[in-house]
Amino acid sequence: MKKLQFKVSISASVTTIYDFMLGINSKSTYEQWTSLFNPTSTYEGGWDKGNKILFIGVDEKGEKGGMVSKIAENIPNRFVSIQHYGLFKADQEITEGPEVEKWANGFENYTFEENNGTITVTVDLDTSEDFLDYMNQTYPKALDKLKELCEK
């Protein structure tokens, strides 16, 4: 498992950024910035601590797939920790086996920090070797999209 970190500075209120990043008031804001990972990205579940949440999209074959995760921590407007513990494939949750072991207990953490009216969003991410290049290329673009949405 490799650790990656991405940062973006956004000129908007922390409540707006937190809301848009998680899609609290409108899931469409989450879907817009995560569309850079998959045009059909969405989630099923909730963001409260302890909740199970599925991060899913439809692949090129029309099959729904993604990650099975739980919210390890959620301190509104400050910190969100997502623990990925399984895969969602062909309408099934897969929580053990060789495919899952690459991801098992990987975390994706969002930290929101204010400095002189600008909010820095830091994403700390555990990823498998297979996805290293993809995440390094895609995550910064997705955060730029989040910035664009929040600064409108």
Image (spheres, rainbow, N blue to C red):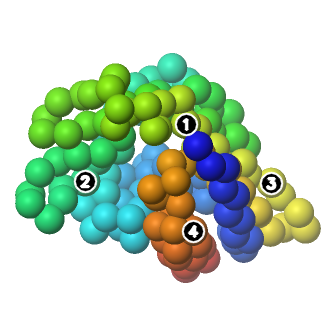
Tag nearer the camera, 2 or 4: 4
Q: Position of residue 93 (x, y in %)?
A: 24, 28
Which residue matches tag 1? 106
The answer to which image quadrant residue 58 occupies is: bottom left
Callout 1: SS = strand
Tell me if label 2 and label 4 are in contact, CB under 8 Å: no
Q: Earlier in the sequence, mark 2 or mark 3?
A: 2
The quadrant of the image that shows the C terminus is bottom right
Callout 3: SS = strand
Which residue matches tag 3? 113
Q: Residues within 10 Å of mark 2 (few under 14, many from 20)?
A: many
Q: Earlier in the sequence, mark 2 or mark 4?
A: 2
Tell me if label 1 and label 4 are in contact, CB under 8 Å: no
Q: Amino acid at mark 4?
A: Asn
3D distance between C-alphas at marks 2 and 4? 20 Å
| Residue found at the far top of this picture | 50
Which residue matches tag 4? 136
Q: Residues within 10 Å of mark 1 (few under 14, many from 20)?
A: many
Callout 2: SS = strand
Which residue matches tag 2? 57
The answer to whether residue 136 shows anywhere in this view is: yes
Q: Earlier in the sequence, mark 4 or mark 3?
A: 3
